[in-house]
Image (tube, grey):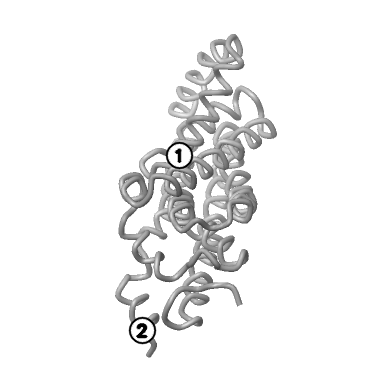
Amino acid sequence: MTEAVSAAKRAGRFPTAKRRVLVVVLLAGALALVASSDELHGWFIELLSAAEPTIRGRPVLGVTVFVLFAALSAMLAFVSSALIVPVGVYVWGKATSLLLLWVGWILGGVCAYTLSRYLGRPIMKALSSGKALERYEDRISHRAPFSLVLLFQLAMPSEVPGYLLGFMRYHFWKYLGALALAELPYALATIYLGASFIEQRKYVLIGVGAAVAAFSGWALYTLHRRIVDKGSGSVSAQ
């Protein structure tokens, strides 16, 4: 058994990477539970209805807050976009909310990359999961192929690739391309979760949550298989 296989087993399948799957499952379950109660769902819709005039009255501020909150969720593990997505969908609709969420996540990824690249390891460890970064630091190099970086971005919570690839000084435009491509399907799914909640479609909520969890699980499994198949050492371009 290679050293890489042993390391992967000792890491317990990288529990931090499973957080994205767990969050999606819990979020979909919680939203479905609330949507199944007319009383709870109605109370939440009343809150959204009360907030709508304020947001529409200050459109620039509303958009700025939404994008910045989305950016923070891509930089900090304890911040979640789930808190703002239903508000965005209710006020602006699915298409605009999708664009704003996607832009916010890209902005957050770029900020994480830039901070780590120029401020180094202290900021990387302070703002992200140190254990996850240590597990992948020896497996993905600054010469890693684009396909591996895209898979890494799909499999991991979004803040981890940003900080790690910035610290490694991975090519910025390749990182940006992988970031934009990887975040788009998750942004779509998140918006549909929010829209399905507002429309009280609990079975759609469960279906979308299950689909995203399965997709994340596939990406994580494929990433581990690819790293292990490369044997010991970092994964770089061929």
| Residue sitting at x 60%, y 17% | 60
**Foreground residue, 138 or 28?**
138
Q: Residue furthest bottom?
A: 1
Of pointers 2 and 1, the one earlier in the residue sequence: 2
Q: Position of residue 211 (x, y in %)?
A: 57, 57
Q: Position of residue 97 (x, y in %)?
A: 63, 32
User: Does residue 52 appear in this view?
Assistant: yes
Image height check: is 98 above or below 6?
Answer: above
Quadrant including the C terminus:
bottom right
Q: Describe the element under mark 2 as helix, strand or loop.
A: helix
| Residue sitting at x 58%, y 11% | 58
Tell me the number on the disc at residue 3: 2
Disc 1: CA contacts within 10 A as few (<14), some (14-19) or many (>=20): many
Q: Position of residue 20 (x, y in %)?
A: 44, 53
Tell me the number on the disc at residue 150: none
Quadrant including the N terminus:
bottom left
Q: Residue furthest right?
A: 95
The residue singled out by tag 1 in the image is 73
User: Does residue 24 appear in this view?
Assistant: no
Q: Position of residue 199 (x, y in %)?
A: 60, 33
Image height check: is 1 above or below 202?
Answer: below
Q: Amino acid at mark 2?
A: Glu
Q: Amino acid at mark 1?
A: Ser
